[in-house]
Image (spheres, coloured by chain):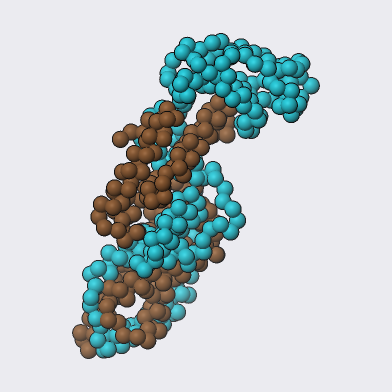
Amino acid sequence: MKLSHEDLKKLYRSSCAETSREEGACPPVEFLMSTFLPETSEEDKFRVADHVAGCRSCRAKFELAREILSGAARLTRESEGVALTEAEVSALKQMAAARLRENEKGRSFFFRYRYASAAAGLVMIMAAILLVLRAPLNKDSGAMRGEAGAAIVLLNPPGVQKALPLHFEWLPYPRAETYEVKVLDERLDIVWSSGRIRATSLDLPPGPAKGLKRGASYYWKVAVFSDDEILQESGLQSFQLQE
Amino acid sequence: MAGSRKRAAEIERTIDRFSQVIRSAIRKTCPSIGKADIDDIEQEVKVAVWRQIEKNEKGIHNLGSYIWRVAYTTTSKVMKRLTQQRKELIDTWDDCRGADKAFQSPANSGPDQQYQSRELLQIVGESVDGLIDSRRQVVKLYLSGMSTEEITEYFGWTDGKARNLLSRGLADLREMLREKRIVLEE
């Protein structure tokens, strides 16, 4: 399978979205913000970078803060090294007081148009949600790994297995040295793995077999190896133990 | 006196530009936040900045650094307010970027596709976590969407350091993925 850098970024962000974080593992906003200060140690910046890259919520805050402070840094470069006289500081403080008074007066005026702004905002949110729901899905339905080539043919078990032992069987695969069988439950969690075997069939051992629930659906698949390199993987085949 | 007022007016223009920076940053990070919310935040920012200036007791010896510190303090307040009072905005930020879901199988896809997607996500996540420390952090930030210039700026490094770490980190990652029969383009 080939990946572009853009695919890799999407994959990485998706893998982070799947990972749940422990409660309380996120740093406080103050600590996250402090890593943008020049005096913060590289070690602390590394810690935050490590966390942020894998945490959706903190990444959102981090990106927003970074965008704002980058923009602020560009603005401040124009004023670097400029010192204000006492008169200029005084004039600035007077302007600040005036702007704050105007703001207090203007709040009632502003609130008159809040509902119209809120309605416009709601329309924009609905449009954004519709756009997100139409985002394209990955259509890659080919083999994920291994060479494009002959498929592995799975023979047994059939859909419904009446009795134990559960016997797995498949056709030999060209150039195969070893195989590995995996059994998965309905949630696609692996419940048993055979490890590397040379045969093209085996019985599920009694221990794992006892753990299977009658009536529940399971899946199995086979991976083919040569020199420890995976050659091909079968698709998932379902089976059920009859109740 | 006229010169002082002129200086104050220049600083006011800088503050207006700063509030525009905040608007742009919010729109870029999550376009689903409504205009009314952005207007609110912009107004809060301006009030917070003017309050800080009004209360300033020390002289201003370096205007650039002063403005940056004011911007930093204001941004911290905005971030805290957003996270405490508008948690739903934080939660929806990542959802806005639909591309993050591009490799998650839809709920109605077959078990094969779902399993393959999960395995691919796991391989990528584990491979990145397997990189050595300094390269891992840089690669993680790169995969999260930061450019090498932004990474350099964040760490305060000299030019080239981020590029070198990223180049070596991606080379290591390429090798790990190759062992899993996944080819990462150059």
Q: Relative to residue B5, is residue B28 drawn left or right?
A: right
Question: Which quadrant is home to the N terminus of chain B?
Answer: bottom left
Depth check: give the residue in front, A98 or A50. A50
Question: Which quadrant is home to the C terminus of chain B?
Answer: top left
Q: Where is residue A169 in the image (x, y as percent from the top left)?
A: 62, 13
The quarter of the picture where residue A206 lies is top right
Q: Position of residue A109 (x, y in %)?
A: 45, 73
Residue depicted at 37% across the width and 80% down the height: B53
The quarter of the picture where residue B152 lies is bottom left
Residue depicted at 38% across the width and 51% down the height: B134
- Residue lying at the far left in this picture: please name it: B3
Depth check: give the residue in front, A177 or A233. A177
User: What colour denotes chain A?
Assistant: cyan
Q: Relative to residue B84, is residue B25 drawn left or right?
A: left
Q: Say above or below: A189 vs A43.
A: above
Q: How many labels does the image show?
A: 0
User: What colour denotes chain B?
Assistant: brown
Residue depicted at 26% across the width and 89% down the height: A87
Depth check: give the residue in front, A140 or A145. A145
Q: Position of residue B113 (x, y in %)?
A: 53, 28
Q: Relative to residue B148, is residue B131 drawn left or right?
A: right
